Amino acid sequence: MPTSKFLNMKLDSAFSAARHGRRFGAWAGGAASPVAWLAVPALGFMALVYAVPLLALLTRSVSDPEPGLENYRRILQHAGYLRTIGRTLGLAALSTVFALLLGYPIAYVMAMRAGTRLARFLTFCIVAPYVTSLLVRTFSWQVLLGRVGPFNQLLHAVGLARFELLFTPAAVLIGLTHFLLPMMILPLVSVMRGIDPTLRRAAASLGAGPAVTFVRVFVPASVPGIRTGTALCFIYGVGAFVIPALLGGNSGRMLGALVQTAISQQADYGLAAAASVILASLVCAVGFVLRRGLSGRQAVAVEVPARDRTQGLARDATAARPGWFASTLVKVLSGPAAWLDRAGLSSLPGSVSGFAAVMGLAVVLPQAVTLPLSFSSSRTLVFPPPGWSLQWYASFATPDWTGPLLTSVTVGLAVTALAVLLGSLAAFGVTRGLSGRTGAIARLLLLLPLLFPTIVAATAFFIAFLPLHLDDTWIGLVAAHTTLAVPFVFLIVSGHLSALNPTYERAASSLGAGNGAILRRIVLPLLKRSVLTGAFFAFTTSFDEAAISIMLSGLNVKTLPRRMYEALAWESDPTVAVVAIVAMAVTAAATLLSGRWSSGRQRPPADVRPETSTPRTEP
């Protein structure tokens, strides 16, 4: 499944699971179907490893150090904590708005000029950062925004004073916007490609100019993509931990960093639990508002100026009613759009494409600083390097770095195997065996990790695993990472399975094949591409996961993201540049292998015929 389609269905599936509990195939008999039992291992795993720690987190917030709401009062009555909450909401909202404003033109060009060189170039610019480690991207911005970074060097070269960009809220805003852009753009592209082009032609035939047509027709029609992208960006933005901790310092600290500090430095687990519950509540509240505000079906609302109505033109609108957000957005942009049409600026060729190309370069180029820095002769993060050396490659070859790398790869492979097994079986069991309310509840439980920031889950894991002595252990780390990877596999495989023609399954069943044989010989070969795509996402999710690794790993089990975080937060070690190159190489290798293994046209098994053909009997 393409990444854009996967992202577009990612949050929608979580919020509207009740609409997807359908049955497929003649032998899928509802909630009591034998196939439904295939979902039990994944459902039990997610309930035990993810849902129970969330309940433990909620319980700890009202019971530590004593029963009551004292932890919440400490947060809500403390001016510093309230400022942190306000800063968290403000930075998450601003970064989401900037991601929408900057990403919408890029998505528009990618969708409208699909197949062209520019569209392929923009796709690479957007997808490359998405599959790159968050710590790598944050490291790049540390270099770029540093006092001796390129921005300040440029100011110094033109005779201006150096500006302190690093460890400010502005640095957090820049880093968050860069991090969230792919999550905004990819869902938008998926929706924009499905917009009926006749709507725009109809608006133009009524006398609307290009800008008015765009604002009153195309923008409302793309609201589903805006909704998904906005919700994704806000959830990941409000729960950001690594970016504020490494780019913001004390002045840019957000709620996730407060939670981590309360656990690692103060051992105040009750306060950390209460802050996590507040964070999760904020996400749910804003998600509900976005869901209601961005609801509404595709609508056309072309307002023709009054002087044009005298020429026989009139207003045309569909019966569909957009949400308040779309209506407000159209009203706000209608005036500037009409002015652009009257001034003739909306007809200038290449303006949107040029802006999209520049923004695409701005998205992908920050990662390029890691390559020259890995050969730097300086012990500080200076760009461009003052000289060249292989000393940091030699430093990376030491056990201090190769040990965490091996740990991350090993944990990632274990998580991939477990997530593919659980997620694929759950997809088959839920899609083919459950329906109605039972299927909706099963989907909600399997997709629960997509609804909460990772820092909330990391805190819940730490609080639940600590009394069980599962913190800083392989078992605890694999279990926690698997809960984040299972939804990816489940969504991708179930999406393909829902679209799979059940003819071959019915034909095999009519020939006497049992459910096990149908699953092994029919369904799995047809789902090979989806399973491998899910395996890719599972591995990269585990390999790049920072928040849970920082919370759960330590002296005994230290992953590469944990070691990178230590180097960036406390050491300013240029070896991180080499690690960044290695991390990107591992991700690229996983991408290429996934594409190679899943390439080729998927054909039904040779020994199965559709039920319309003559069945072949065994001798």
Image: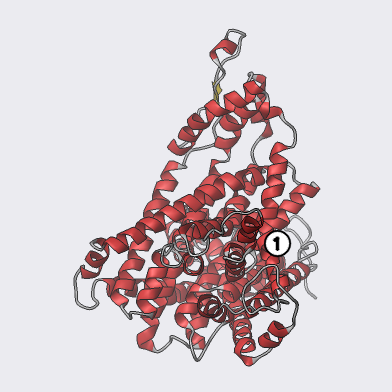
Instruction: Return the residue nearer the eye: 50 or 608.
Output: 50
**What's the residue type where badge 1 is placed?**
Tyr
Image: 101 above or below 214 = below
Residue in view at x 40 percent, y 58 percent:
88
Task: Indicate the quadrant where residue 101 lies.
Answer: top right
Instruction: Judge whether residue 521 can be spotted in this image.
Output: no
Which quarter shows the C terminus? bottom right
x, y (%) of residue 450? Answer: 49, 63
Query: In screen coordinates, is 335 left or right of 189?
Result: left
Left or right of 194? Residue 606 is: right
Q: Describe residue 14's horizontal placement relative to residue 612 as left or right.
A: left
Q: How many marks overall?
A: 1
Where residue 584 appears, x then y in whole percent?
Answer: 69, 71
Please identify the quarter of the rendering in which residue 394 is found: bottom right
In this orientation, does residue 265 appear?
yes
Camera-side residue of 305 and 613? 305
| Label 1: which secondary element | helix
Residue at 64 percent of width and 18 percent of height: 207
Quarter of the image that includes the N terminus: bottom right
Q: Kindly identify which residue carries mark 1.
A: 504
Q: Position of residue 95 (x, y in %)?
A: 50, 53
